[in-house]
Amino acid sequence: MAEYALAVRARRAVTPDGVRPVTVGVRDGRITALAGLEQALDAAVTEELPDTEVLLPGLVDTHVHVNEPGRADWEGFATATRAAAAGGVTTLIDMPLNSLPPTTTAAALRLKQAAAAPAAWVDAGFWGGAVPGNLADLAGLHDAGVFGFKAFLIDSGVPEFGWLDAARLDAVLAETARLGALLIVHAEDPGVVGAAPGPSGRRYAGFLASRPPAAEEAAIAHLLAAAGRHGARVHILHLASAGALPLIATARAGGARVSVETCPHYLTFCAEDVPDGATEFKCCPPIRESEHRDGLWAGLADGLIDVVVSDHSPCPPALKQRETGDFGAAWGGISSLQLGLPAVWTQARARGHGLPDVVRWMAAGPAALAGLPGKGALAPGCDADLVAFDDGASFKVDPARLRHRHPVTPYAGQTLTGVVRRTWLRGREPGETPSGELLRRP
Ligand SMILES: [Zn+2]
């Protein structure tokens, strides 16, 4: 019998030590050898990547709304995980809201796991939710293996997932600190948003004004102060305002345990270019002006922003209100699970970043955030989650080729650089049946 089930030879591979030629040896779904290209491994199957392709570790997307069970007409495990695999994402962590029930109790987590188990084409784990009234459920969810807890500091957009006022946030932080759990937070301040003009109508500028940068900055300041009182570890979701970065830098310099993410759409688009009525661009917090986009790139460059994840948050097309184009009435959420890698690579490359940066932001970083030591790196001992990426090829986004349940996307018609040619999950390319595993916090 061959020593390895699979060997993948690549002239360029992004490893923790940089880009180099490798032969990856895979046994029992794990990378067990990372040899030079000159070394021939005794493998049952040997794959040789063409020179146009670079081998990457499978991406880890810690911010995905799958919405099943309960709102499977919005998205679902089968469609979301197929889209993920097609986009080079081999691990996703599902958000606790927009499914029914939301993942706020251990019983609800079991329903999620039951929905995901037969349908997951990539590995999938789960965040729990921290909402008013479920403080006593957090320990049980933690024991059941959620990767941490998500909370909102403002209306979440769905009635069954409430938000935390100051007193409740304090109580939740005391509990997550006690459990040693991570709290991930949608940080916009309801007072600031409440005082801003409402978002109704087709004008993007009107929507933008309804959720100003000050809302993010106030909520982040409030969160950092509260987390500091408890010594709690927190993560700021989907940062859109570059104005909050100095706050975060100061908190970190003072020893705060805080990490930060942003998303492909904040790094790609800017408010100046969003047409009125184009509700496929609506998300919360909103896509802001180009100075924020530049500031977020600077935050990535200097390490203040740790990860880039999709915040894939689809809905049925009717809820996007494309006929009226009313930003007040439309659902806020952008679908990009399948497009995150080329979207980010397109911009990163133009701004002088390399693939090791993209791998740090979209694979190693999210794996570290969730606490998944076996994911996100081409290294011995890690799962053999591999992506063959043609980093020089470009394509025009055709919504019909997306495997998301609904093809609505602001990327439609955009030319992106980078094509995912092949994906292996634990050493296997997708077969006839889903082979993703459900993940629990180790
Ligand atoms: Zn989200």
Image (cartoon, rainbow, N blue to C red):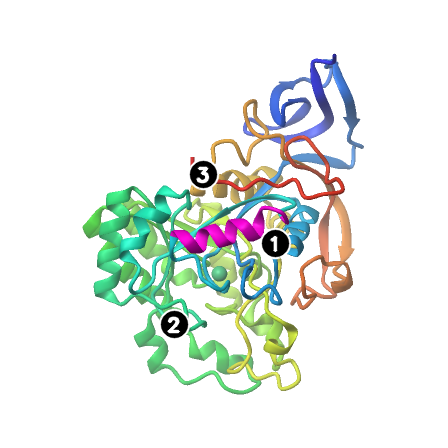
Identify which amino acid the numbered label 2 is placed on: Asp
- Mark 2 or mark 1, earlier in chain: 1
Q: Which residue is mark 2?
A: 155
Seen in the image, is 188 located left or right of residue 405? left
Q: Nearer the viewer, residue 271 or 190?
A: 190
First in sequence, mark 2 or 3: give its number: 2
Residue drawn 52% across the image and 68% down it? 287
| Range drawn in magenta | 106-119
Q: Can you tell which of label 2 and label 3 is closer to the viewer?
A: 2
| Most foreground residue, 48 or 151 | 151
Locate residue 273, reporting x and y percent: 61, 72
Tell me which corner region of the image, top left, top right, bottom left or bottom right, holds residue 161. bottom left
Mark yes or no: residue 336 visible. Answer: yes
Residue located at (24% from left, 63% from top): 168
Residue under label 1 = 77
Please give the residue where the numbered disc 3 appears in the rendered image. Answer: 368
The residue positioned farthest toward the left in the image shown = 229
Res 224 seen here:
no
- Compared with 437, 133 (above or below) is below
Is residue 57 one of those drawn in magenta? no
CA distance separating discs 2 and 3? 29 Å
The quarter of the image holding the C terminus is: top left
Quick one: SS at disc 2? Answer: loop
Badge 2: few (under 14), some or many (20 or more) residues near its Cα, within 10 Å? some
Check disc 1 and give the amino acid type: Phe
Q: CA distance from mark 1 to mark 3?
A: 23 Å
In the picture provided, is 176 more to the left or to the right than 117?
Answer: left
Q: Is residue 161 above or below residue 51?
A: below
